[in-house]
Amino acid sequence: MNTDTQSLSVIIPVYNEVELLGEAVRTIDAFVKQHFSHYELVIIESGSTDGTGALCDQLATELSAVRVIHEGARNGFGSALKRGYKEATLDWVWFITADTPFPLESIVKAKALFGQYDCVLSYRSEDTRKSAFRKVQSVVYNTLVKTVLGLRVKHVNSAFKVFRREVIQSLPLISNGWFIDAETLYWLTQRKVRYTEIPVPLIDRTGGHSTITLSTPLTLLKELRRFLQERKKFQ
């Protein structure tokens, strides 16, 4: 039996993921149970139209660790994450999407560092995505954001991140879209939060449909502009 004292809130934001969600949540639940004696899975469902909402409720009856929050509308990835962070109740907060874009074993590697840092971030040690356009897009975006916001992390939007709950809940996050990753790193840097980065491979999704589109880069730039205008209110 796992007897460690660290506890983990897993945030799972979902929108129209009926194809992937059932297997993903059961797999995450079984894996986390092996490594944490106390944990919860908080699913933030954002107004899905494909039956995902009903599946979430079914999973909550099937798995005792699952708790479902229905946002009622598609307000954006950042909105779902912020709600998840607010709802988290345990020591550490880890978010993962239904397409599981990195090995679950990454949390075990991070767990060994919990006593030294307040959050464990990641950089991409390998990128298996097939789209060359997406890879170039990522390089351009990372370079721009790191320059504008003065970030020293290796990779802005590498998917794996885990935070001490008190830290993530204290950040004045405002972004409702994909810019939430960059904004989070900005506030961690500004507040001199102790963090480290570990290598984690990015795994391309094998099912379902990504909500990232060709218009996403433009939306990110608009969110960056808005953040630059509003951040002084919280400094």
Image (tube, grey):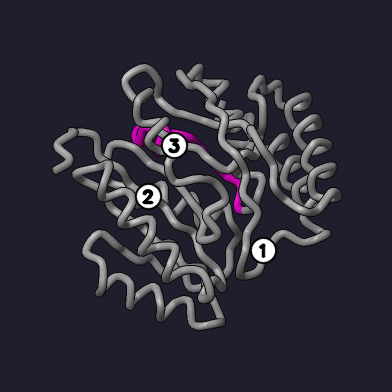
Residue 172 inside the magenta-drawn segment: yes
SS at circle 1: loop
Residue at horizontal 14 percent and vertical 37 percent from the top: 3
Give the residue type that dot 3 points to: Val
Describe residue 211's horizontal placement relative to residue 27 as left or right.
Answer: right
* For residue 210, side relative to residue 21 (left or right): right
- Pointers 3 and 2 in contact (CB under 8 A)? no
**Image coordinates for residue 31, horizontal then vertical, percent:** 33, 51
Of 30 and 143, the residue lying toward us: 30
Residue 84's mark? none
State the residue at coordinates (44%, 63%): 24
Q: Secondary structure at mark 3?
A: strand
Q: Look at mark 1 in the image and give the residue it sits on.
A: 210
Find disc 2 in the rendering and name its residue.
Answer: 10
Circle 3 residues within 10 Å: few <14, some 14–19, many ≥20:
many
Residue 51 is inside the magenta segment: no
> For the residues marked 2 and 1, what is the alpha-carbon distance in whole angstroms?
21 Å
Q: Read off the residue under disc 3.
A: 162
Mark 1 surroundings: few (<14), some (14-19) or many (≥20) residues within 10 A: few
> Quarter of the image containing the N terminus?
top left
Left or right: residue 109 versus residue 185 is left
The C terminus lies in which quarter of the figure? top right
Which residue shows up at 80% across the image and 49% down it?
A: 134
Q: Is residue 165 above or below residue 99?
A: above
**Residue drawn at point x = 62 percent, y = 63 percent:** 206
Q: Earlier in the sequence, mark 3 or mark 2?
A: 2
Identify which amino acid the numbered label 1 is placed on.
Ser
Distance from disc 3 to disc 2, alpha carbons, whole Å, reads 9 Å
Q: Secondary structure at mark 2?
A: strand
Q: Which residues are magenta?
A: 164-176
As rendered, which of 78 and 31 lies closer to the eye?
31
Percent x, y for residue 100? 52, 54
